[in-house]
Image: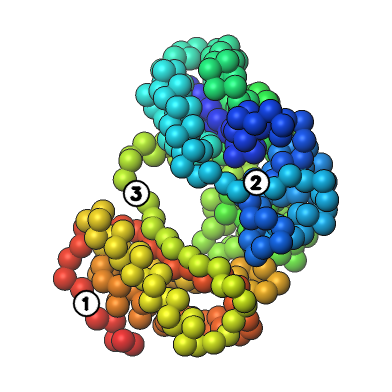
Amino acid sequence: MSRVIFHIDMDAFFASVEQRDHAEYRNRPLIVGAPPDQRGVVCAASYEARQFGVRSAMPSRTAAKLCPQGIFVRPRIDHYRQESAKIMALLQGVSSWIEQVSVDEAYMDLSERCTACDPDEALLQAIPLAKALKRRILEERHLTASIGVAANKFLAKLGSDFNKPDGLTLIPERDKVSFLRGLPVGAIPGVGPVTRQALGQFGLETIGDLQDTPRNLAAAVGSFAPTLKRLAFGEDDRALDMSEERKSISSETTFTQDTESRPLLRAALKELAADVAATLEKEGVGVLTVQVKVRYSDFKTLTRQIRLSEPLTSASEIYRMACHLLATHKLVSSPIRLLGIGASTLVPPSPQLRMPFL
């Protein structure tokens, strides 16, 4: 049976919900996030605002300078989650094989409904299903979605991003290599700024460069090399993850003023660790991977993590581990704007082993 994967991505979700609910915001540059006179960032921007260069995660003050006529509204997270649940219910009406990635995007496996033997014929069978799904979301939720249709998750994700908003993009198997050639290497998941810079030092700027190079990519990206090469040719055998188990827990705080004060940072870490530990207790799990996140005055953001042999559950142990990461990696090197603790690789709790450095 040929694989048929959809990636559904709601268009400017937070901003679109606000424009739907408030007629005065429609067709105007809307920015969901902190007010421009306060410390904070943009959560989402309407397509009218994006024309001015406004993007999510941008400081609100910067967004206001780029788009002086922008309308700023505070996010209504609970409302967006409720809307997300209604959209996911619509998807369930098409297929039970769904992996929800975030509040506004999901993968669907339509392989059982598209039974042509030829892979590209199966993908073509899926197009009417994709059109009907987009139409239903528009009619029932008054929102638009972009859908990518392909034989795997990587290509489907690229397809949903290709022709936004309200897009529908099919990437046939026969065309996938040529489709990828002109895209930047950063279009490949896992290729962030550091990896992109490492590849650039070898003259590898596009996916086509990766396809053509005879060079051993391990010299640039280490153990990621085989996966990178496969993705460059559009090969991705990842299955949908339909488990409902929580994958990670995090807590973070933005300081009123950027700070290097050790007492203030330690106090913040204790609060964050207590918050994470309370959620772990509620979920009945322990954590094997602890991460710290820092954002500096210039908005440069760094994360560092450590993998443990035994799960942690207590606030004191998570706090100690976070302090260890900050000290080991010398992260308090300049004033810090934001500080966070993350916990992932969630497992059943068990008696903890103290790490030697503690």
Quadrant in the rendering for residue 197: bottom right
Task: Return the residue at label 3.
Answer: 246
Work out whether mark 1 precedes mark 3 in sequence or the reverse, and give the earlier one. 3
> Residue sitting at 48 percent across and 65 percent down?
252
Q: Nearer the viewer, residue 39 or 201?
A: 39
| Looking at the image, residue 33 lies above or below residue 351 | above
Q: Nearer the viewer, residue 92 or 79?
A: 79
Q: Nearer the viewer, residue 144 or 211?
A: 144
Given contact means CB atoms under 8 Å apart, are the residues at marks 1 and 2 in contact? no
| Looking at the image, residue 169 lies above or below residue 230 | above
Given contact means CB atoms under 8 Å apart, are the residues at marks 1 and 3 in contact? no
Task: Return the residue at label 2.
Answer: 73
- Give the quarter of the figure containing the N terminus: top left
SS assignment at label 3: loop
The residues bearing labels 1 and 3 have C-alpha atoms spaced at a distance of 24 Å
At which x and y percent is residue 10? 59, 32
**Pointer 3 local density, CA inside 10 Å: few below 14, some 14–19, many at least 20:** few
Quadrant in the rendering for residue 172: top right
The residues bearing labels 1 and 2 have C-alpha atoms spaced at a distance of 47 Å
At which x and y percent is residue 66? 83, 53
Count of labels in the image: 3
Task: Return the residue at label 1.
Answer: 353
Q: Nearer the viewer, residue 148 or 326?
A: 326
Residue 222 visible here: yes
Work out whether mark 1 precedes mark 2 in sequence or the reverse, and give the earlier one. 2
Tag 2: amino acid: Val
| Looking at the image, residue 240 lies above or below residue 71 | above
> Residue sitting at 33 percent across and 70 percent down?
274
Given contact means CB atoms under 8 Å apart, are the residues at marks 3 and 2 in contact? no
Between circles 1 and 3, the one closer to the viewer is 3
Work out whether mark 3 precedes mark 2 in sequence or the reverse, and give the earlier one. 2
Q: From the viewer's perspective, is 152 left or right of 15? A: left
